Image (spheres, helix red, strand yellow):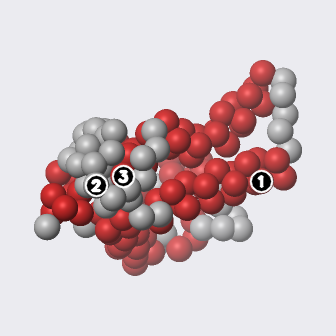
Amino acid sequence: MILPLERYAEFSGRSRRTEFFMFGLFQLLVAIAIGGVILAIGGEGYGFPNYDPTIIWQLSGHLAVAHAINWIVSVSLIVPNIAVTVRRLHDVDRSGWWASLLALPIFLIAAGATGIRPSIAVLWVVSMVSYLALLIFMASEGTDGPNRFGANPRHIDA
């Protein structure tokens, strides 16, 4: 679960499906724990449908600390998340640049500032196709034996 934290910014080599999905489970459990703390100390009014992102600046005390911890944890997990995704792509003999599909919807939104306004439907379709393609890659079995990115991690772990 925490192997990607030990390999924090290692973008070379390969990672097994187990490493990738267990790290995802680890992140989910951390998010549930922090969310539970936020709800327990009175943060239940900050969810949808009345979500106001500016409310975070109006928080005080324990709730502000809990939200700050949530933000710090989320930001600190970005690099190992990208790294394990790149290594997982390497295991299925794909370039790590395929991980940039995750940022495609963000680039489309940013393009809206230049005058090109993608519709919500276009953003949704692009997001779903991108995420589905990456999910298929992540769930695929790695190449048997060594590939251009290194030795098979299954045989190394054994």
Q: How many marks?
A: 3
> Circles 2 and 1: CB distance less than 8 Å?
no
Residue 115 visible, this orientation: yes
* Front: mark 3 or 1: 3
Q: Position of residue 81 (x, y in %)?
A: 37, 50
Disc 3 residue crowd, few under 14, some 14–19, many 20+, Cα 10 Å: many
Q: Earlier in the sequence, mark 3 or mark 1?
A: 3
Disc 1 residue crowd, few under 14, some 14–19, many 20+, Cα 10 Å: few
Identified at 46% across, 55% down, the residue is 59
99 left or right, relative to 26: right
- Residue assigned mark 1: 125
111 left or right, relative to 18: right
Camera-nearest residue between 150 and 28: 150
* Front: mark 3 or 2: 2
> Which part of the image, by quadrant, shows the N terminus?
bottom left
Q: Picture quarter containing residue 38?
A: bottom left
How many angstroms separate mark 3 from mark 2 (CA)? 10 Å
Label annotation for residue 91: 3
Q: Amino acid at mark 2?
A: Gly
- Residue assigned mark 2: 145
Q: Give the structural element (helix, strand or loop) at label 3.
A: helix
Please determine whether, in this image, residue 140 is positioned above or below residue 14: below
Identified at 85% across, 44% down, the residue is 119
Camera-nearest residue between 19 and 148: 148
Q: Picture quarter containing residue 2?
A: bottom left
Q: Amino acid at mark 1?
A: Val
Identified at 84% across, 24% down, the residue is 115
Disc 2 residue crowd, few under 14, some 14–19, many 20+, Cα 10 Å: few
Q: Give the structural element (helix, strand or loop) at label 2.
A: loop
Q: Earlier in the sequence, mark 2 or mark 1?
A: 1
Q: Position of residue 77 (x, y in %)?
A: 34, 50
